[in-house]
Amino acid sequence: MRYSDWKQATPFLWYCVLVFACGDLIFGLDSSSFGSLQALPSFLKDFGEQRADGSYWLETNRKSLMNSIVYVGRIGGVLVFEPFTDKFGYRAAFLLICIAQVIAVIVELTAKEWIQFTIGRIIAYFAVGMIEGVVPSYSAEVSPPALRGFFAGLITPINTAGSVWGAAMSRAFATETSSKGWLIPIAIQMIPAIIALPLMWWVVESPRWLVAKGKTDLALINLRKLRRPEDVAAGLPEAEIAALEQAIELDLSVREGGWLDLLRGSMWRRTLYACLAFFFYQVTGNQFYNAYGPSFFISVGLGANSFTYAIIVQLVGMIGSWMFVLLTDRVGRRPLAITGASLLIIWNFLIGTIGSRPNPSESDKQTVVASFVLLIWSTKISWATLCFLFASELGGVRMRKKIMMAGIFNDVLWSFVVSFTSPYIMNYIGGKIGFIFGGVAIVSLIFAILFLPELAGRSLEEVDELFEKPRFRWGWQFKNAQTEGVGHRIAALESGNEGQLERIDSGKGQISHMEQAQQTPLDKRM
């Protein structure tokens, strides 16, 4: 991104995006911190079983259920996101998220049995499921095109920042045996929601949603608040609203695609690619660490230092996610995915080899920790951040929401599978579970090299054309593939390449300045 692109980010735009980003903190705090929480002595004392030697532990069935059944709530949030947002808007959806999170934390804090605590986490995961759709979608709709990838991609680095926060709270109570050792880390999960609730008073509704509901006057007021004063003075918000109305009409004219269309024509391949991206995200080691990382560290003899290492892992992961967000539009999706997948193979096989040794030395333990640190970093620069952007691009104009929902469903499904099965697999093969994730990483590398298409800089209309003509293309061929028609025209306009646009239209009649003003924003809401 150029410096001129960043000048389009007004203070009020930052305010609206960052208030919604409190949802990403909720996401990170809840979905990642339980991996540390379930290893705390205070939590084990209140919700675990006592061994003969007086120590406490979560027996396998209970650990498996507490880590996996919460995904029922997440599925519910994913399914509710689209119809609720379509009817009531993004602000109402985010208020529901905050209220659900507050209720969830209260249920957890008052729990005396592990079943009530798990019910609280199911409610919290309902909020997480909605966050996955609401936050990046709102950020994308209010942002200028040049900054859309950055603002929509903030979900991963801010989510990871929440994970760092949660891991740090667990480290602070690593040796605490009274109930406050887990009550305080749980209580802080309410903070982002409490902060966001009053701040939502000044956040504006998405102009695109308002236009879709026929509230054009309010949409124009909101858009003027989001855009630069010089753009407002030049009348650009009015042109953008006019283009949004035109885009809504186009959207209504192509909204005939049903769920079965995901398996028809060229769409089946796009659906498969989106599902595979989320599969690789969860089954190359990331979800195993989120659910059981600190417990695994303790199992190899790292004691209370396990929680310190958990903080380091999440910090490095946050660096990786920021790297992806800042680099993906510059270097492309494919190079980052190939690099990350290659490294995931190395770290998983190191964990499988060294983590399964019966009497690991100190150097072995440190190697395992370093491998997990680099594994999470490698995931964040590849599948963890790529999958959300990739799935949102693959559907083109007509099927993007359905393909995104299919991808997120796979995200939840494989999160559940890994969380539920890992304790049982660990009982049989221990640290060799790393070989399973390493094998999946090999498959992900093959997919990234042969099939992953490069879609950076493409308009949604271009994506449709790329997959239709021809019906099959190797992954590396997408970058230099030529398109024509409206998709190419929109991409040329958004890149400011007017000379190229004139060459495209030579012999067809030139586009007038008024037509350009109407067409330029056509892809702003996609």
Image (cartoon, rainbow, N blue to C red):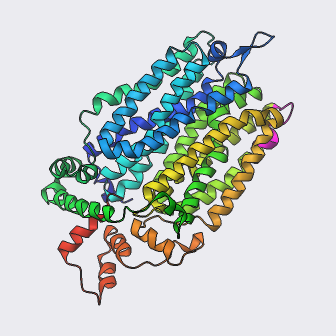
Most common SS among magenta residues: loop
In depth, the one of 323 and 440 nearer the eye is: 440
The residue sitting at the bottom extreme is 507
Q: Which residues are magenta?
A: 351-361
> Can residue 382 be seen at all in this image of the molecule?
no
Specify whether residue 379 is painted magenta.
Answer: no
Specify whether residue 360 is painted magenta.
Answer: yes
Q: Residue at x 83, y 32 (%)?
A: 360
Residue 322 image position (x, y, % from top left): 49, 47
Q: Residue at x 38, y 45 (%)?
A: 83
Q: Residue 396 lies in what quarter of the image?
A: bottom left
Position of 131 relative to 223 (above/below): above
Q: Residue at x 53, y 78 (%)?
A: 470
Is 345 positioned to the left or the right of 514 in the image?
Answer: right
Which quarter of the rendering shows the N terminus? bottom left
Which quarter of the rendering shows the C terminus? bottom left
Q: Residue 51 lies in what quarter of the image?
A: top right
Is 65 positioned to the left or the right of 77 in the image?
Answer: right
> Can residue 306 be seen at all in this image of the molecule?
yes
The residue sitting at the right extreme is 358
Is 471 positioned to the left or the right of 258 in the image?
Answer: right
Q: Residue at x 55, y 37 (%)?
A: 315
